[in-house]
Image (cartoon, grey):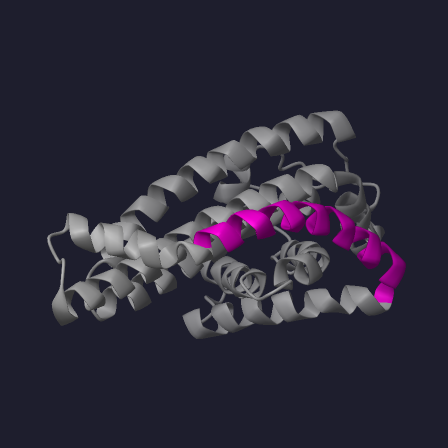
């Protein structure tokens, strides 16, 4: 009777995902010029996002006050508490949508760069089938819209949760990082999984599901890096490399049932 496969411990899986995200930065030593080129699409998207996010941050106080007023808290310490809580909730919900939209647009604009990065990491599997650029772009944009729609739905839930005093904001931020990280990982693994014959988004989700904790550990780490000032621009190339390493680290038979 064949030996049963050992089931990794949950903590070990999460740590493996976080370590993979960190290992993605080794791409700077392996191909610094390519990594620098990979920053260009992110910088273009970030320039547009920077304006929008600046406007949002500048008006967060007014948005919080408007929500507090709508909930009937118009003066005193309660109005202040509700206003601050609402402002943080709006910021947490907006972050999820912003990261999803940033990743979709950056992967679409820099598809050729990111495919080259992923292929270089995956060089020993270069004979695997590859997706042509134009079909990959169309598929990426269509799947990005699905990710964005999911993010919008989840962000609305997080906004409501975030309105709970004291615990709401922390809960919304944590859930947003976990959900957003998983969505981000699904997007970033498109290139290496496509080379292994797993092209459709639903098939990627199915292939990664048994390793969800590793995927979340990787994706949440990248998500948090994206929230840092200029973090998304600097981390995007490393995230693509890390996603390729994540796929390469899966068991050999992981994709046979897809």
In the picture, which quadrant includes the C terminus?
top right
Question: Which residues fall within the magenta stretch?
Answer: 30-56
In the displayed orientation, state which residue is furthest to the left: 72
> What is the total number of numbered labels drawn onto the structure image?
0
Name which residue lies at 22% across and 58% down.
163
> Is 158 positioned to the left or the right of 37 in the image?
left
Quarter of the image for residue 104 reads top right
Q: Nearer the viewer, residue 173 or 128?
A: 173
Give yes or no for residue 41 being in the magenta stretch.
Answer: yes
Q: Nearer the viewer, residue 113 or 226?
A: 226
> Is 42 positioned to the left or the right of 124 in the image?
left
Residue 30 in sight: yes
Residue 246 on image: x %, y %: 63, 58
> Is 154 positioned to the left or the right of 258 in the image?
left
In the displayed orientation, state which residue is furthest to the front: 75
Residue 182 in sight: no
Name which residue lies at 14% across and 51% down.
71
Quarter of the image for residue 127 reads top right
Residue 38 on image: x %, y %: 78, 52
Name which residue lies at 51% across and 32% down.
145
Q: With respect to residue 228, does 193 lie above or below?
A: above
> Is 77 positioned to the left or the right of 103 in the image?
left
Give yes or no for residue 236 being in the magenta stretch.
Answer: no
Name which residue lies at 62% across and 66% down.
21
Instruction: Specify the principal SS of the magenta part.
Output: helix
Residue 231 on image: x %, y %: 63, 63
Q: With respect to residue 69, does 200 lie above or below?
A: above
Q: Which of 195 and 217 is in front in this view?
A: 217
Residue 120 on image: x %, y %: 83, 53
């Amino acid at each position: 009777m064949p030996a049963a496969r050992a089931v990794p411990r949950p903590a070990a899986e999460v740590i493996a995902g976080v370590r993979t995200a960190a290992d993605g930065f080794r791409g700077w030593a392996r191909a610094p010029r390519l990594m620098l080129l990979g920053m260009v699409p992110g910088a273009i998207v970030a320039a547009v996002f920077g304006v929008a996010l600046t406007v949002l941050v500048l008006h967060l106080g007014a948005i919080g006050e408007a929500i507090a007023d709508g909930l009937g808290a118009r003066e005193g310490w309660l109005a202040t508490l509700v206003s601050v809580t609402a402002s943080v909730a709006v910021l947490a919900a907006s972050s999820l949508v912003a990261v999803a939209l940033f990743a979709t647009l950056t992967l679409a604009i820099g598809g050729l760069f990111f495919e080259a990065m992923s292929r270089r990491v995956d060089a020993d599997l270069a004979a695997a089938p590859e997706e042509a650029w134009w079909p990959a772009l169309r598929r990426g944009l269509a799947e990005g819209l699905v990710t964005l729609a999911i993010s919008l739905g989840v962000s609305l839930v997080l906004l409501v949760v975030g309105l709970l005093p004291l615990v709401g904001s922390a809960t919304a931020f944590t859930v947003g990082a976990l959900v957003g990280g998983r969505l981000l990982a699904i997007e970033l693994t498109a290139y290496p999984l496509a080379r292994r014959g797993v092209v459709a988004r639903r098939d990627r989700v199915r292939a990664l599901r048994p390793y969800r904790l590793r995927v979340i550990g990787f994706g949440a780490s990248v998500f948090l890096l994206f929230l840092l000032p200029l973090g998304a621009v600097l981390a995007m190339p490393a995230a693509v490399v890390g996603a390729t390493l994540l796929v390469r680290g899966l068991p050999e038979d992981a994709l046979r049932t897809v």
